[in-house]
C-alpha cells in the first residue's frame, strides 16, 4: 500500500488501523538536539482525541503516545523517531452487520476494488483515526517552528450555515480553546454547539470550514512550479479525511475582484498594503501572514437507514452502528495545524539544504 509517507526531508510515515492494536509512525529527517516538550505533544493529542466533549464521538481513547526510538534524555538524536498510540476502546462488533455491505460516501467500495480486501471495522486504514499519528509529527514540527517564532493557529469559522464573518486580525485567539467547538467568537460558538446537538438528535451530521493562519514565515519558503508552498499546503489539507476544498488568500472571492483592487501593492519596507496573496507569491512565501480555509463535508456515517449495495452489487438496506462525530470540525482543528507545521518545517529544512548547496557550488 503506497501513499503513507508525507514530506521530503522532515518526513513522516504513518501506519495502523482504526480497530487494530495500535497506530503509529516513523519520523525521518528530524534534526538532533531539540529538547522535546512532551506536555505540548500530549496537549495536541488531547485536542484531537475522541470523547473530549458532548459534541464529538463518545469513543474513549487516552491517545497516549509511546516513543520507541530517536529520543534520549528528552532530546531528539537525529535518528528515526518511532512511536505508537494504542487503541483501547474499539468495539468491532458494531461493524459486523456491514461487513458485506458498502457504506454510501465511504471508501468501502473503492478499497475493495483496489486491494481485493477491506477492513470493515470503522473503515480500517481509511478511518480518520489515522490522523492521530499526523498530530504527533506535527506537534514535534511545531516545536522546531516555535524556536523560529513561527506560529500556527487554526479555528472553526463555520458550521453548516453559521459563519464567522469577522476579520481574523480582530479575533482573540485565546478564546479558541474556551469552547469545545473551537470558534473564537464565543457567542457564535454556542450557536454552533446548539446546531450540532440538534442535528445529532436527528441522526444526521454537519460540515463546515476551518481557517488557519501561519505567522512569521520568512520570505523564500517554497519551491517553484510543481512544489509551490500553496500547492503543498493544498495537498496536505486535501489528504485529511472529509476535506472537500482548500483555498488560500483571497480564494474564490478573489475571482470577483478587479486586478486593480486585488494587487498587493508594496510598502517601502517590502511588505504589502493588502494580503490577497495569502502570504504566498509564485509559490514562495513573501513574509506576510499565510492564511487559508479548509472545507469539510458532513460526516458520511449517519444514524439513519440507507439504501446501498452489498459485495454482490445487490440492493440492501444499511444501518451503521458505532460511535461517530456529528461534526468533525472541532477535532480537525489540531489536524489542520499539524499538517501545516509538517509542510512549513519541511520547506524550511529544504531552504537550509539549498543554501548549503549554493555555498559549496560557488567555491
Image (cartoon, rainbow, N blue to C red):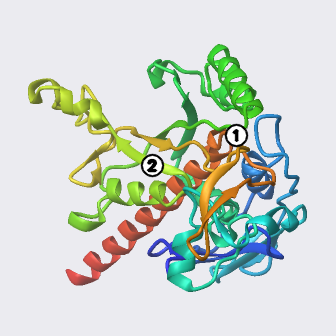
Mark 1 residue element: loop
Residue 263 visible to the viewer: yes
Left/right placement of residue 344 relative to residue 325 reads left
The correct choice, above or below, for 245 with respect to 191 in the image is: below
Left/right placement of residue 244 relative to residue 31 reads left
Which quadrant is the N terminus positioned in? bottom right
Viewer-side residue, 296 vs 93? 93
Residue 146 visible to the viewer: no
Viewer-side residue, 32 vs 236? 236
Lower sequence index among marks 2 and 1: 2
The correct choice, above or below, for 108 with respect to 79 in the image is: above
Left/right placement of residue 31 relative to residue 82 reads left
**Residue situated furthest top in the rendering:** 187
Viewer-side residue, 136 vs 332? 332
Mark 2 residue element: strand
Viewer-side residue, 160 vs 225? 160
Residue appearing at x 32%, y 37% in the figure:
249
**Classed neighbour count for the residue bearing mark 1: other residues with Cα under 10 Å, few (<14), some (14–19), many (≥20):** many
Q: Which mark is residue 1?
A: none
Which quadrant is the C terminus positioned in? bottom left
Mark 1 lies on residue: 326
Residue appearing at x 15%, y 31% in the figure:
263
**Classed neighbour count for the residue bearing mark 2: other residues with Cα under 10 Å, few (<14), some (14–19), many (≥20):** some
Residue appearing at x 65%, y 82% in the figure:
80
Residue appearing at x 26%, y 55% in the figure:
283
Residue 196 image point, x, y percent: 69, 29
Q: Check if mark 2's residue and mark 1's residue have beta carbons within 8 Å.
A: no
Calculate the distance from the C-alpha at mark 2 to the C-alpha at mark 1: 17 Å
Residue 323 image point, x, y percent: 80, 50
Residue 21 image point, x, y percent: 84, 76
Mark 2 lies on residue: 244
Amino acid at each position: 500500500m503506497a501513499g503513507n509517507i508525507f514530506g521530503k526531508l522532515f518526513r513522516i510515515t504513518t501506519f495502523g488501523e482504526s480497530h487494530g492494536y495500535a497506530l503509529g509512525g516513523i519520523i525521518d529527517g528530524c534534526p538532533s538536539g531539540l529538547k522535546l516538550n512532551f506536555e505540548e505533544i500530549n496537549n495536541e493529542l488531547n485536542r484531537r482525541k475522541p470523547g473530549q466533549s458532548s459534541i464529538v464521538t463518545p469513543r474513549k481513547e487516552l491517545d497516549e503516545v509511546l516513543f520507541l526510538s530517536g529520543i534520549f534524555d528528552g532530546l531528539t538524536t537525529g535518528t528515526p523517531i518511532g512511536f505508537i498510540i494504542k487503541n483501547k476502546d474499539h468495539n468491532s462488533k458494531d461493524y459486523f452487520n456491514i461487513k458485506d455491505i458498502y457504506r454510501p460516501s465511504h471508501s468501502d467500495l473503492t478499497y475493495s476494488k483496489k486491494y481485493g480486501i477491506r477492513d470493515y471495522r470503522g473503515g480500517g486504514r481509511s478511518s480518520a483515526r489515522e490522523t492521530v499519528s499526523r498530530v504527533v509529527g506535527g506537534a514535534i514540527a511545531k516545536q522546531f517552528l516555535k524556536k523560529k517564532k513561527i506560529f500556527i493557529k487554526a479555528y472553526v469559522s463555520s458550521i453548516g450555515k453559521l459563519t464567522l464573518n469577522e476579520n481574523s486580525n480582530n479575533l482573540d485567539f485565546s478564546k479558541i480553546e474556551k469552547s469545545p467547538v473551537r470558534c473564537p467568537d464565543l457567542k457564535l460558538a454556542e450557536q454552533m454547539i446548539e446546531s450540532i446537538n440538534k442535528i445529532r438528535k436527528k441522526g444526521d451530521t454537519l460540515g463546515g470550514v476551518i481557517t488557519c493562519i501561519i505567522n512569521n514565515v520568512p520570505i523564500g519558503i517554497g519551491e517553484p512550479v510543481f512544489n509551490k508552498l500553496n500547492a503543498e499546503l493544498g495537498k496536505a489539507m486535501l489528504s485529511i479525511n472529509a476535506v472537500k476544498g482548500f483555498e488560500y488568500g483571497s480564494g474564490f472571492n478573489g475571482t470577483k475582484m478587479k486586478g486593480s483592487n486585488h494587487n498587493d501593492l508594496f510598502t517601502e519596507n517590502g511588505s504589502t498594503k493588502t494580503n490577497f496573496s495569502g502570504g504566498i507569491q509564485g509559490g514562495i512565501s513573501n513574509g506576510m501572514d499565510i492564511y487559508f480555509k479548509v472545507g469539510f463535508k458532513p460526516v458520511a456515517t449517519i444514524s439513519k437507514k440507507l439504501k446501498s449495495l452489498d459485495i454482490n452489487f445487490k440492493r440492501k438496506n444499511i444501518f451503521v452502528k458505532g460511535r461517530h462525530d456529528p461534526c468533525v470540525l472541532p477535532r480537525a482543528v489540531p489536524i489542520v495545524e499539524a499538517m501545516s507545521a509538517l509542510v512549513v518545517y519541511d520547506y524550511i529544512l529544504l531552504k537550509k539544504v539549498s543554501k548549503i548547496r549554493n555555498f559549496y557550488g560557488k567555491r
